[in-house]
Image (spheres, grey):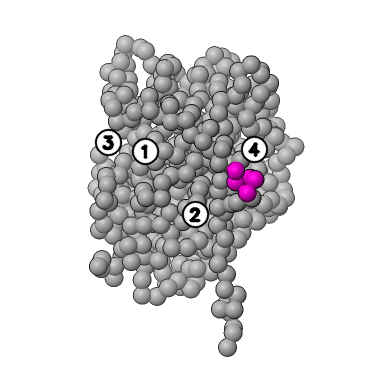
Amino acid sequence: MTDNSAHPNILIVMADQMTPFMLEACGGFGARTKNLKALADRGLQFTNAYSPSPICVPARSCFMTGQYMSRTGCYDNGDPYHSFIPTFAHYLTNAGYDTVLTGKMHFVGADQLHGYQRRLNTDVYPSGFIWSYPLLDENDPEAFAFDFAPQYQAQNIGPGWSDELQYDEETHLRALEYLRYAPAGRPFMLTVSYTNPHPPYIVPRKYWDMYKDSDVKLPHYPDNMDELYSEFDRAFLRWYGLDRKSIRDPEHLTAMRRGFAALAHYVDDKLGELVDVLEETGLDDNTLVIFVSDHGEMLGEKGLIQKRSLYEWSARIPMIMAGPGVTQGEVTTPVSLMDLPRTLLDLVGVEPVTPMDGRSLLPAMTGQKLEEIPVVCEYHAEGIMRPCFMIRKGPWKLIYIHRSPSQLFNLDDDPGEWNNLSGQSTYSAIEAELTTVVTDGSFDLDFIEQDVWARLAQKQVVNEAMAKNNTHWDYKVDSDAAGKYVRV
């Protein structure tokens, strides 16, 4: 049996669609994030952290398993991954941890726990396969998949209340309750996952008033921006209908960024309250706190919104940790959200039964320099429906689009990703090196392309039957009212 007497508690706090470029704690602008800053000041910030996939469900499958999404087979927001793939929650459960989830994890399918002993509330989104979509009908020029544009237009942004806010309030309440009554005699691993600052940008009035008149930096648009789009970009302009519904007006850009900043501030306050309870209960000395997001948000950069893009605003995430044994400072070496499972296993001295694609960050946590290795972010589904990868190493970043021209950027010289160096002889060596990461056989590109399509028809059959049978996998919380509060 594993000796867990010296194992730290683990508190993972996850935000949704939170780009670091708008967070003051991450060197960005817009959102005043004092609690994130305080966490970073006493701990370690990874300044070049990436999502393994810039879309919720695939990114979270990688976060849970430490595997690339093309290995879990989780391509889009309507995809499950196999229950036999061990997650860090399974491993920590076996190591003696009380493993608990409150909030969004967007598990799709019948397994709504994936190793957690229990959830404290249900999920905010559906558990079925209904959010899987193929390419648009090429014969219908007016077709689009998601009309997200209204969520990013000024007339629909401002003070108010939403289902998403109500959900986060419940998520937070359950987290505070758990921490105040954490089980004695065994370590806990509590994951608290908020759905904000994911749109809609409907904001509690308190926070809206903080930002309603604030200046926010707006994106720069070169005159020839439309000519610089890749095939990937053009697919998503059409996917969202942005080729017909522009969000580039400064009024819309200002409103969406103020709304994002206000909701990021809201999440930052939630983090502060969680840390306060750790201090009040005396748990802070033995609790590792990790703050991350599943992916970023374009917020009008390059004329794009939402996620799914492999550009920095969509692919980069905040990653900050503090706690016992964690050194103070910054790590500039690129890392991935997918590295956290291997890190947690190393922390408690557990070996995975099969190799993980993510690596351990424990050396960085103890002050050692991380080896510079390529970090991969992948996206193969909605909108493009074929293998697409981002590979980052040092200042270099390649966007590989299967059977289409690549994009190569030097982020030190070109942080806005405007100057595509792909195909230039001066940079052929680094482009070949990064391309080989994808094409050397580590990823079966032909299989991925076929698999993305093959499962769509299968899921449609299941969706139709479940609708007719009125069957659902949504998590239902067991609530023993008679066992709560004062009953004796």
Amino acid at pointer 4 = Met
Give coordinates of residue 191: x percent, y percent: 46, 57
Between label 4 and label 1, give the one nearer the viewer: 1
Image height check: is 373 above or below 321?
above
Amino acid at circle 3: Glu
Q: Nearer the viewer, mark 3 or mark 2?
A: 2
Dot 2 or dot 1, earlier in sequence: 1
Image depth: mark 4 or mark 2 in front: 2
Q: Are marks 1 and 3 in contact (CB under 8 Å)?
A: no
Q: Which residues are magenta?
A: 465-469
Disc 4 is placed on an element classified as helix
Q: Quadrant of the N terminus?
A: bottom left
- First in sequence: mark 1 or mark 3? 1
Foreground: 378 or 196? 378
Name the image quarter holding residue 43. bottom left
> 5 left or right of 478?
left
Q: Which residue is mark 3?
A: 372
Query: In the rendered image, which residue does mark 2 sit on?
Result: 112
